[in-house]
Image: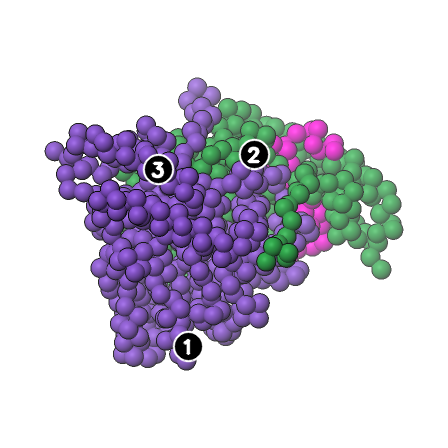
Chain colours: A green, B purple
C-alpha cells in the first residue's frame, strides 16, 4: 500500500479574506499543536471553566442569565442544536430570511417538522422587524423566532437591539445566528433578551473552524429541563452543560483538545484587546475597504444602513468573469476571497475578520484586486 | 476586562495511556498548525479526495462498495449519524450491549424513537453472535443490527467476521462501532458486509480528537437516497457525501482544516506502516502489557478469547483506591490511564494505541504503576 500513499501535505499560506475562515494569530496557530490533554484530565476542567467564562463575556451573557459553551463541531451544529432542543414537530417557528443562512434555518426547522413562517427580504436588505412582529402577532403561540444577526451570504446586519426590545414581553424564544457577528460587531445577548445564540470559531473570533460557541438564556434552559429530550444526543445542550460546566462532569464526548486550546487563546486575545476596541477595529477596516470599492465604482450589495464592516459583498460588474478574478487572486496573489452562495446574485465577498481586520490587510487585498482587474476584460465571460 | 482574562495555557506533556486520546507523532502534531486553508479552496478538494481514499483503505471498504469520509465532529457523532439516517420511529433495532458504548447506542436509538431489542452480555464478555441471530430471527423485519466491535469500556472484541457471515443473506443493515478498533486490529468492512461503520480520530489512528470517520455500503447509500431525509442536517451522510466526495462540491459546513491536515498525516502514517504491521505492533504491545499484569497477579476484566490488545481493563484489587492510583500516576509520573465508566466494575483502563502501541511505552507505564502500587496500602479506601 506504501506505493499509493499520498505525500505529506505542503500547505501554502493564504491571506484569507473571504467569508471565513480568516487567518489567525501566530499564538493561536501555535496553540493548536500544544500537547494533547485527555478530556477527563483535572487540568482540562479548569481550562473548560475558563474558556466558558471568556465566551460568556464575549457574548455578553450575564452570569445569572444562562450558560455559554462551545459545541465540538462547526457553526451549523449550533444552529441545529437550538432547533432540536427548542422546537417540536408542528411548533411554529418564525424565521427571517434574506440570504443563504436564513434559508438554512428554514431547511433545518423543516427537517425537525416545524411549521415554518418565513419573513423574507431581498438579498442585501435587512428583514423588517415590523414584519417579524406582525408574523408573531398572527402566530402568538410561536415557539421560536430566529433571525440571522450578520448574514454571511450578503453582508447585512440585523438590528437585534430593536428586535429584542419588541420581543421583551413575549413567551416566544428569540434565537440569533451570530456566526459572522461574534467578536466583530456588538453582540449583547442578555441586554437584547436573546434566548439562544450560536456562532463559529473561524471568523471574527480568529480561531480555526471546528467549534460552535452557543449561549442559552436561563428561561430557555428551564424550558429544556421540563421538556422531552431532543432526538439528537451529540447536540443536546443539556448533556453538553453536564459535561462542560457541571463538576464533576458527566462524560459526553472526547474533547478535541487542540481546538479547545486554540479557542482559549483566541478568546484571551479578544478580551485582552477589549470588545469595544475590537469592534472599532472591524468598523474602521470595513469602512476603509467599502469606501475604496466605492471609489472604484464597484456596487455593494448591502443596504448601506445595514452594511456589516467585516463582510463586504461586491456585485460583479457586467461582463467580468467573477470566478476568474477569484481564481487569479488565489493563484497569483495567494489571496482568498469568496463568491456568491447558491441563489445569490453574482458577487465577490471580501472578509476582514478578526486578525485580518486592519487597514494593512485591506490594502493588500485592494492592491491585488486592482492588479487583476487591470486586465479583467480578458476575463470577461464568453 | 483585561484584569480578569486568564493567562495563556501552559500544557504539560502527558503520556496518554488510557482509553484515548492517545499521543500522536510529532509530524501529526505539527500538521495541526499548518496554515489554515479555506473549505472552498481548490487545493482543499484534492486533500479531501486523498484523505477519503486513505480512509477507505484503512477501513478496507472496496471502492465500488460505498463511501468513506470523516464527519467534522467527534466519534459519537458518527454513531448518531448512522442511527439518524437508517432508522425511523418504530423501526426495530437490535443492539449488542456489553458495556458503556453499547448502552449509548441504545440511548441514541431510543432518542430516535426506535423499537430497541437489546442483546446483553456481562461487562468483560462478548455478546453472543448466536443470540444476536436469534433476536434477528424473532424480528426478521429489523432495520438495523448494531454491535460494538471494540468495547472501549471493557476491552472486549466482537467477532465481526463471524457476525458478517451470519448476516450475509439478510436485508437488515449491519452497523459496527469501530471507535477503538480502527487502525489497531483488523477491520474489513467489505469482507464482513458491514453497511455502516464509525470511528474516531484519537485512538489507534493516532490523531487528535475531533473527527469521526464513517463508511457506508452501497446498499445503505441507496436506501438513504430513496428514503425520507433524516432530521439532522449537520450529520446527514448524503449532504456530507455531496460536500466531501462530489465535484464540484455542494457547501455544507466549514471544514476544520487543522483536523483535516492532522488526519491526512495520520492516515499516511497508518498506510506507510501497513495495516498488518500496525495490527501486529498493537498485538505485541498489548500481549506484553497483559502478561505483565498477570505476573503481578492483576485480574483482567475481559474474556481472554475476546481481549483487545489496545485496551486492557484491569480490575482494581480489593482494598486499593483505584482513583488514587490514577491520580498519582498523573501527578507524579505524567501518565494518564483511565478508570471505569458509569455502570462498570472498579477498574483501570490501560490503552496502548497508535503511536503508543509499543513495548517501550508499556514499560514506562508498568514502571510507574509499580512505583505507585509499592505503597498502595496507604491508598486503600477508608
Picture layout, residue A129 above or below residue A67: below
Q: Is residue A49 left or right of residue B273?
A: left
Residue at the image point whose x is 37% and y is 76% from the top: B166
Secondary element under disc 1, as helix, strand or loop, is loop
- Distance, label 3 to label 1, CA atoms, is 42 Å
Q: Which residues are magenta?
A: A337-364
User: Can you identify the residue that label 3 sits on?
Assistant: B365
Q: Position of residue B251 (x, y in %)?
A: 60, 56
Q: Chain of mark 2?
A: A
Q: Which residue is mark 1?
A: B168
Give the camera-side residue of B376 and B328. B376
Camera-nearest residue between B317 and B128? B317
Q: Quadrant of residue A256?
A: top left
Mark 3 on the same chain as mark 1: yes
* Chain identifier of the residue bearing label 3 in the image: B
Disc nearest the viewer among 3 and 2: 3
Magenta span contains residue A41? no
Label 2: state its secondary structure: helix
On the picture, is B341 further left or further right than B222?
Answer: left
Say which residue label 2 marks. A29
The question of residue A353 being in magenta is answered with yes
Percent x, y of residue A282: 61, 32
Amino acid at each position: 500500500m506504501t506505493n499509493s500513499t499520498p505525500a505529506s501535505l505542503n500547505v501554502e499560506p493564504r491571506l484569507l479574506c473571504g467569508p471565513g475562515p480568516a487567518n489567525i494569530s501566530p499564538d493561536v496557530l501555535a496553540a493548536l499543536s500544544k500537547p494533547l490533554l485527555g478530556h477527563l484530565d483535572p487540568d482540562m476542567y479548569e481550562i473548560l471553566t475558563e474558556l466558558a467564562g471568556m465566551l460568556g463575556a464575549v457574548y455578553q451573557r450575564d452570569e445569572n442569565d444562562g450558560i455559554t459553551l462551545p459545541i465540538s463541531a462547526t457553526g451549523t451544529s449550533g444552529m441545529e442544536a437550538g432547533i432540536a432542543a427548542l422546537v417540536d414537530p408542528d411548533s411554529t417557528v418564525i424565521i427571517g430570511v434574506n440570504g443563504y443562512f436564513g434559508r438554512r434555518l428554514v431547511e433545518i426547522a423543516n427537517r425537525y417538522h416545524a411549521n415554518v413562517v418565513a419573513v423574507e427580504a431581498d438579498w442585501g436588505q435587512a428583514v423588517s422587524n415590523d414584519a417579524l412582529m406582525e408574523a408573531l402577532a398572527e402566530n402568538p403561540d410561536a415557539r421560536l423566532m430566529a433571525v440571522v444577526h450578520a448574514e454571511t451570504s450578503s453582508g447585512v446586519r440585523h438590528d437585534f437591539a430593536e428586535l429584542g426590545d419588541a420581543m421583551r414581553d413575549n413567551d416566544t424564544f428569540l434565537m440569533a445566528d451570530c456566526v459572522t457577528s461574534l467578536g466583530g460587531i456588538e453582540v449583547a445577548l442578555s441586554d437584547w433578551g436573546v434566548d439562544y445564540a450560536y456562532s463559529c470559531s473561524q471568523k471574527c473570533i480568529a480561531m480555526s473552524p471546528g467549534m460552535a460557541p452557543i449561549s442559552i438564556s436561563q428561561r430557555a434552559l428551564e424550558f429544556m429541563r421540563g421538556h422531552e429530550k431532543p432526538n439528537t444526543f451529540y447536540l443536546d445542550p443539556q448533556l453538553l452543560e453536564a459535561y462542560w460546566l457541571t463538576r464533576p462532569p458527566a462524560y459526553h464526548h472526547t474533547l478535541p483538545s487542540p481546538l479547545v486550546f486554540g479557542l482559549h487563546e483566541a478568546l484571551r486575545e479578544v478580551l485582552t484587546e477589549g470588545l469595544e476596541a475590537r469592534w472599532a477595529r472591524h468598523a474602521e477596516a470595513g469602512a476603509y475597504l467599502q469606501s475604496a470599492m466605492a471609489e472604484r465604482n464597484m456596487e455593494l450589495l448591502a443596504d448601506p444602513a445595514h452594511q456589516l464592516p467585516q463582510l463586504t459583498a461586491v456585485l460583479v460588474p457586467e461582463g467580468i468573469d467573477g470566478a476568474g478574478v477569484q481564481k487569479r487572486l488565489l493563484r497569483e496573489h495567494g489571496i482568498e476571497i469568496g463568491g456568491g452562495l447558491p441563489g445569490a446574485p453574482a458577487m465577490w465577498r471580501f472578509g476582514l475578520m478578526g486578525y485580518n481586520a486592519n487597514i494593512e490587510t485591506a490594502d493588500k487585498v485592494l492592491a491585488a484586486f486592482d492588479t487583476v482587474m487591470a486586465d479583467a476584460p480578458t476575463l470577461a465571460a464568453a
